[in-house]
Amino acid sequence: MHDAQTVTQTTPESKPLTPWNVVLLDDQDHTYDYVVDMLGRIFGHSRRRAFDLARTVDTQGRAVVATVHRELGELRVAQITGFGADPLLASSTCSMRAILEPAEDESDQPGDSRD
């Protein structure tokens, strides 16, 4: 007969993921309608929230549109830069630009409401 052994499994402590800001950059080649639609489709932002962010981009040159972990942030930047030209504006030939940067203070940043 074998003695019963107690097996203790330990799991490494998980650290919270470092937050990153997805920052939408302003340009003159996209309409508010385009930005509102894009932010709704990619981030699930309400029309009101998306409009407020579009206005921030327009007036301040940039807006944090989500604060997420780095991998998801990279995906969101790729989705923005791959969204395509604005069909409502003849001079629009490409997608908007976005960057990913470390979040300074995650407590007052918008989250990604779909993920």
Image (spheres, rainbow, N blue to C red):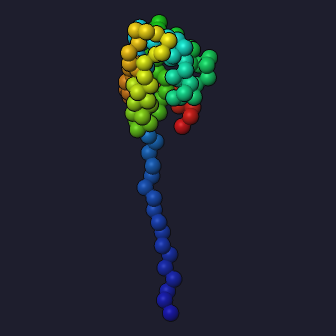
- Percent of width and height locating residue 34: 51, 16
Query: Foreground residue, 41 or 58?
Result: 41
How many numbered circles does the render carry? Answer: 0
- Percent of width and height locating residue 76: 44, 31
**62 horizontally vs 108: left or right:** left
Residue found at x 49% / y 27%: 66
Residue 24 visible in the displayed image: yes
- Percent of width and height locating residue 46: 61, 23
Query: Foreground residue, 67 or 87?
Result: 87
Residue found at x 42% / y 34%: 75
Judged from this view, the residue extending furthest toward the bottom is 1
- Percent of width and height locating residue 100: 38, 27
Residue found at x 44% / y 36%: 72
**Image quadrant assignment for residue 90:** top left
**49 horizontally vs 62: left or right:** right
Compared with 4, 50 (above or below) is above
Residue 111 visible in the displayed image: no
Compared with 10, 85 (above or below) is above
Residue found at x 38% / y 18%: 94
Q: Quadrant of the C terminus?
A: top right
Query: Foreground residue, 62 or 94?
Result: 94
Query: Foreground residue, 108 or 84?
Result: 84
**Image quadrant assignment for residue 45:** top right
